Image (cartoon, rainbow, N blue to C red):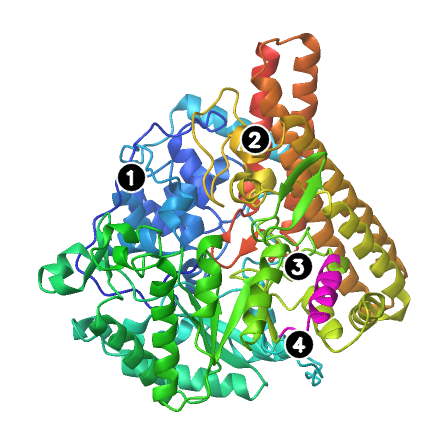
């Protein structure tokens, strides 16, 4: 799982060191004249020219001239809000170009701010590979004659391949934030169902401190109204107790907590007007820097690197948890509740990373008892405040040998939530495996969730399912995956089990989509076909409804072929898609977790043989392509009122198909590139794949410049921007020349 670690504020800590690790050479970028040209190209649509100029010791005019020499239009205007929303995208694209010091300058951050973001902003350093490529300081120098000649050649290629130009977009990046923040035309209608809450995360929630910084509001009024109209009755935020209440051992860590609580109250009140409850995600008690325990050795638990747990077998630590939750519950009485993760994610209790044997106290106790202590402390806090808040214990990360005892230990007022599709057996392309998490292509529930829910029911506890209704790491670069029939079937399967509620997704999937709409319809009692028809008619009009449902069915059939494995969804370049570069020779880099795929096919494919892997992805792409064709036809027949909506649905299907087709082509390219027998037929096929990849990148480029949602996900921000897709065209053209020479 991937989490936003500090959405409610970074822990105020002593100065953090920038993470160190391996420092390999950067990946080669021979399709650019030099690193300076790559720097300007990759930042053209995200960083103002004057800021780029300052970083490399140039004038703005130098940067603009260099960009235009490569055929780039503009530069575009980049607002402060856009820049603020792009820091992950900026860090990732400059990781192989700039040293730490220049990254800080580019972002306008201090050393501590960059260090904290890399460590705590959704495991960013992990996503970047737990390493920093060795980059010398980049200094501007006027391009020499060879660089000018090569830049002119790039401009000629761009004019040939993308004649409308590169650099400007029809729809600016992040335009969807304004669109979703506006008031919808149709108000929400009540949903009649016992399946509540149905809660999700913000589609565009920004890392930072939203309860202290009003500019970071993840739930503006219009967006809440749109979620309510989609049948959502709950939203969630990360809760860091030391930022919402007074941290007893270092009160200075809690500076501003009163303001955050006041702003949380306001958010809760705003959401309540839309029939939406606010939930806080608790992953506590947060580990502290090792130096903290010089003054508090009695609290020390398990150490991992620079951090050590606050041991929950110490009564003082449990009291802290009780008092903190009680304080929040009293201060925000209309808060919907809390949900907890007690194993995995951050280092919290001593058994949270399965290393409790290293604690002198917790090693003497069953792990399930330690987990129970944490959840009971949260429940006691709500009880002490006479609160109405719901407490949901998520069994995320609980090993089978812990689970039954951990469920038996839950307080009676607590509900149990389980990932629906976990352990579901599947067979894709003749390869038998099972689902771990984050699957929309596999329709749950699976045996693990059923088993845990049954144990909870025997105790009289409420039960909830966590699903990915709209987007998953199988495909998160789109606002939703239009495999709506699969979502509807999953919701129907869960409704038959009489569950108390649904978590509609982790940090992805919060776009007000037809997927969320169909969950609303199924939860209110409709069958799968009836729900699909109702959503299609409401969104796309009576004329287009039937073909839209047919398209969703074709896409669902294709998506059911997805070669699922947890290794695939975390390491294959499914999110970067066509923007992931190709290399003439192996880079030696390992693919990173939902980060940079490089050319690490062996990690991408996990348990699947290479040929099975890319053939399955082509099957998936074929299903999305078929659905997209149906949608394009439906758009032609749709009435004027609904035509734009059907066209937007077609764009999402087309862009998704291009992602899957691209990963298939990349996989085959790497497999053939690595082969021992470089025959003429192999060279011919490599050329065909390069032409295919070039064409895919151009198609996706033309879709993204029309639709700012494409390529975006909240925790990773933009996986790519249009300039990256244009770079892939340059990358393919360079390799075509390279292969010709050989």
What mark, if any, has residue 445 been given in the picture? Answer: 3
Q: How many angstroms separate mark 1 from mark 4 (CA)?
A: 46 Å
- Residue 408 place in picture, x, y as percent: 46, 69
Mark 1 or 3, nearer chain start: 1
Residue 18 magenta-highlighted? no
Q: Which region of the structure is painted magenta?
A: 486-499
Q: How many angstroms separate mark 2 from mark 1 (CA)?
A: 25 Å
Mark 1 or 4, nearer chain start: 1
Q: How many angstroms separate mark 2 from mark 4 (CA)?
A: 45 Å
Q: Nearer the viewer, mark 2 or mark 1?
A: 1
Q: Quadrant of residue 148?
A: top left
Q: Nearer the viewer, mark 4 or mark 3?
A: 3
Looking at the image, which is closer to me, 305 or 454? 454
Q: Nearer the viewer, mark 1 or mark 4?
A: 4
Q: Is residue 114 above or below residue 193?
A: above
Residue placed under numbered mark 2 in the picture: 730
For mark 3, give the secondary structure. loop
Pointer 3 local density, CA inside 10 Å: few below 14, some 14–19, many at least 20: many
What mark, if any, has residue 231 been given in the picture? Answer: 4
Residue placed under numbered mark 1 in the picture: 99
Specify whether 239 is left or right of 299: right
């Amino acid at each position: 799982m991937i989490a936003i670690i500090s959405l409610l504020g970074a822990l105020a800590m002593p100065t953090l060191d920038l993470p160190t690790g391996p420092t390999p050479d950067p990946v080669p970028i021979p399709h650019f004249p030099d690193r300076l040209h790559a720097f300007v190209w990759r930042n053209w649509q995200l960083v103002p020219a004057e800021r780029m100029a300052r970083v490399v010791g140039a004038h703005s005019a130098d940067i603009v001239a260099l960009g235009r020499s490569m055929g780039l239009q503009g530069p575009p205007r980049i607002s402060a809000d856009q820049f603020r929303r792009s820091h992950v995208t900026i860090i990732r694209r400059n990781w192989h170009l700039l040293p730490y010091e220049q990254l800080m300058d580019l972002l306008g951050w201090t050393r501590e701010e960059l260090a904290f973001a890399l460590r705590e902003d959704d495991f960013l350093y992990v996503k970047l590979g737990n390493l920093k490529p060795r980059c010398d300081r980049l200094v501007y120098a006027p391009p020499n004659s060879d660089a000018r000649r090569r830049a002119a050649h790039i401009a000629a290629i761009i004019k040939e391949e993308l004649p409308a130009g590169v650099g400007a977009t029809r729809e600016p990046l992040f335009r969807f934030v304004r669109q979703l923040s506006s008031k919808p035309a149709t108000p929400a209608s009540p949903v009649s169902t016992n399946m509540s809450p149905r809660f999700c995360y913000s589609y565009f929630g920004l890392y930072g401190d939203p309860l202290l910084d009003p500019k970071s509001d993840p739930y503006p009024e219009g967006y809440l109204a749109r979620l309510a109209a989609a049948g959502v009755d709950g939203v969630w935020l990360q809760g860091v107790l030391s930022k919402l209440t007074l941290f007893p051992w270092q009160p200075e860590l809690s500076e501003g907590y009163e303001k955050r609580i006041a702003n949380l109250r306001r958010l809760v009140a705003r959401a309540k007007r839309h029939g939406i409850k606010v939930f806080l995600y608790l992953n506590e008690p947060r580990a502290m820097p090792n130096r903290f325990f010089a003054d508090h050795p009695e609290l020390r638990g398990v150490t991992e690197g620079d951090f050590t747990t606050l041991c929950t077998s110490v009564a003082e630590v449990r009291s802290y948890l009780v008092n903190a939750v009680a304080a929040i519950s009293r201060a925000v009485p209309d808060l919907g509740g809390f949900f907890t993760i007690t194993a995995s994610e951050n280092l919290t209790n001593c058994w949270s990373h399965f290393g409790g044997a290293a604690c002198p106290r917790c090693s003497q106790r069953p792990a399930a008892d330690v987990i129970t202590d944490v959840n009971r402390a949260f429940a006691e806090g709500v009880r002490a405040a006479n609160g109405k808040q719901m407490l949901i214990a998520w069994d995320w990360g609980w090993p089978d040998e812990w689970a039954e005892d951990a469920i038996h230990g839950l307080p009676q007022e607590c509900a149990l939530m389980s990932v629906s599709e976990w352990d579901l057996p599947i067979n894709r392309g003749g390869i038998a495996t099972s689902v771990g998490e984050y699957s929309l292509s596999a329709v749950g529930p699976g045996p693990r969730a059923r088993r845990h829910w049954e144990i909870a029911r025997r105790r009289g506890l409420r039960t909830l399912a966590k699903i990915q209704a709209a987007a998953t790491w199988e495909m998160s670069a789109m606002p939703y995956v239009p495999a709506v029939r699969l979502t509807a079937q999953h919701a129907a399967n869960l409704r038959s089990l009489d569950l108390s509620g649904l978590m509609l997704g982790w940090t992805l999937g919060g776009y007000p989509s037809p997927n969320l709409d169909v969950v609303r319809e199924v939860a209110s009692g409709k069958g799968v076909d009836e729900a699909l028809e109702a959503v299609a008619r409401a969104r796309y009009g009576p004329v287009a409804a039937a073909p839209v449902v047919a398209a969703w069915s074709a896409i669902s059939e294709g998506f059911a072929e997805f070669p699922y494995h947890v290794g695939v969804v975390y390491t294959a370049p499914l999110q970067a898609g066509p923007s992931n570069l190709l290399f003439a020779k192996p880079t030696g880099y390992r693919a990173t977790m939902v980060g940079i795929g490089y050319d690490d096919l062996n990690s991408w494919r996990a348990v699947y043989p290479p040929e099975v892997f890319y053939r399955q992805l082509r099957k998936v792409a074929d299903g999305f392509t078929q659905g997209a064709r149906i949608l394009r036809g439906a758009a032609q027949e749709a009435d004027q009122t609904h035509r734009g909506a059907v066209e937007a649905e077609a764009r999402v299907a087309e862009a998704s198909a291009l992602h899957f087709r691209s990963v298939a082509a990349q996989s085959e390219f790497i497999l053939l590139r690595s082969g021992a027998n470089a025959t003429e037929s192999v060279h011919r096929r490599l050329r065909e794949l390069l032409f295919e990849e070039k064409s895919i990148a151009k198609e996706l480029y033309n879709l993204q410049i029309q639709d700012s949602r494409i390529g975006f996900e909240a925790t990773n921000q933009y996986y790519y921007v249009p300039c990256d897709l244009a770079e892939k065209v340059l990358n393919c053209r360079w390799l075509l020349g390279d292969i010709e020479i050989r």
